[in-house]
Amino acid sequence: MRTRFLRHTLSGLGALALVVSAGPLAAQHSADTLTSDLTVDGLHIILRRNTANNVVAANLYLLGGTRQITPANAGIEPFLLDVSERGTQRYPQGIIQRKMSLLGTEITVAPSEDWTIFGIRSTDQAFDSTWAIFADRAMAPALRPADVELIRAQFLSAIQQKRDDPDDLVEALADSMAFVGHPYSVEATGTVSSLRAITAADLRAYHKSQFVKSRMLLVVVGNVTRAHLEKLVRATLAKLPLGTYHWTLPPPTPSLPAGVAFVQRSLPTNYILGYFSGPLASSPDYQNLRLAMTVLTGGMFSEIRSRENLTYDVHAPFLDRAATSGGLYVTTVSPDTTLKLMRLFVQQLQQATLTSTGLNRLELSFVTDYFLQNETNASQADFLARAQLYQGDYHHAMTFVDELRAVTPEDVQRAARLYIKNIRFAYVGDSTRVDRNLLEGF
């Protein structure tokens, strides 16, 4: 489930303390001499030269995400990119799969609310050959009707499988509750009705209008020189139309009244997930709420999972998007008891103040875990892209630790008070086991 985030990092922190912290540490910035910011014929590129390994990750961000689509054509972008694997202008049907198998490399497609990542995972020796296939898929997909039908069937089957999984179901229901009227309410991977309606002609029209350089950010991390990358780009992606797209942050997610939606299922346990509106990623409260949710995860896991054994999973997800959201998740056979404890921890976070020592332990644990998750070149590429797009400058990726350490206990408490309210819950399981008022009382 994609919303799970650092759920077990702070399980040893226990309950929250009531002591005021010392002031923030002074930020210390070091120059980044490994990263270049360049533009090649209108295509924005961030390159981080990494000679420590022979892996190259190249992420092409198709910006806008769900703001580029409507409920009627939801899923069209990953649909198009997956169809492109079936053949392009230079690589007829079947050739791409054979070449990629021989190269031992991978081309990935990852749609999300803010963008779609079209990415390469390669060795430096195979990068040029993989790039040739990657670029042709982006520039000249064949989009044959037979291939469209094959990929359509795969997408529809995947949607059906998600419906059968209670975790996926509760997440889809929670999304539909929390993001009413917001671009995030549109499903990036599509729905049954939208995917059934999209034709090969629709894909060709979308490619012509949307695959433009102004809508692209290319981030490359690996043992590739600037001169070599510029040469590859000029021969391929730089030939795409420029377009008139301009990236901006989306509006904040809507602040809606508390509510709950039920799906009655006969299951061994009950799945509960609710979201609330958070700040934009450009806001000073971005890190404050992130840490607040990590504190909440640690406290709830320690008490509800480890001590009371009421669940195998409880956490407070932080949806790290351009317009953030936070939430509460648990799966339990005792929803009333569990929800009361969750509410208690929310109240403690809002009414108490962490100690300086407690916050420092939290920050160290968070930073360690976060950077363990960002050891790969692909993760570093995504880290750089988020800093550039969310905060307007990739250099913020290098000041992440300083920004976290600048957060005070008062900041955490204020963010908890300001944002953790009016939670809209989805409940999948036996609805007769839960008091609705407990869900509507957050």
Image: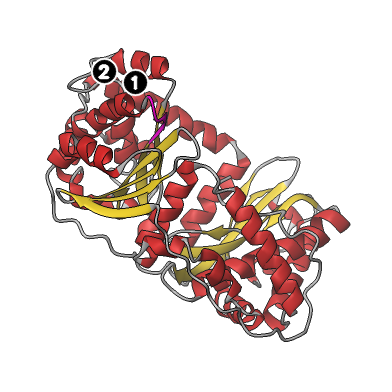
Query: Would residue 61 be seen by someone viewing this image from the given angle?
Result: yes
Spot the residue most to the right.
Answer: 307
Residue that carries the numbered disc 2 in the rendered image: 146
Residue ID at (19%, 40%): 206
Give me the disc on residue 376. none
Tell me if residue 121 is in the magenta stretch.
Answer: yes
Say if the magenta span includes residue 186: no
Task: Measure the alpha-carbon separation of dots 2 and 1.
Answer: 6 Å
Front residue of 269/49: it is 49
Q: Give the image location of residue 64, x and y in percent.
A: 30, 54
Q: Quadrant of residue 229?
A: top left
The magenta-colored residue range is 120-125
> In the rendered image, which residue does mark 1 sit on?
150
Is residue 421 rendered to the left or right of residue 377?
right
| SS for callout 1 | helix
The prevailing secondary structure element of the residues shown in magenta is: strand
Which percent across, then down, holds residue 430? 71, 48
Residue 123, located in which quarter of the rendered image?
A: top left
Query: Could you tell me if residue 316 is visible in this image?
Result: no
In the displayed structure, would residue 115 be above or below residue 282?
A: above
The correct choice, above or below, for 138 with respect to 174 in the image is above
- Judged left or right of residue 242, residue 270 is right
The quadrant in which the C terminus is found is bottom right
Three-letter amino acid code of the residue under disc 1: Leu
Asked if the residue under mark 1 is in contact with the one under mark 2, i.e. CB atoms within 8 Å, the reply is yes
Q: Quadrant of the N terminus?
A: top right
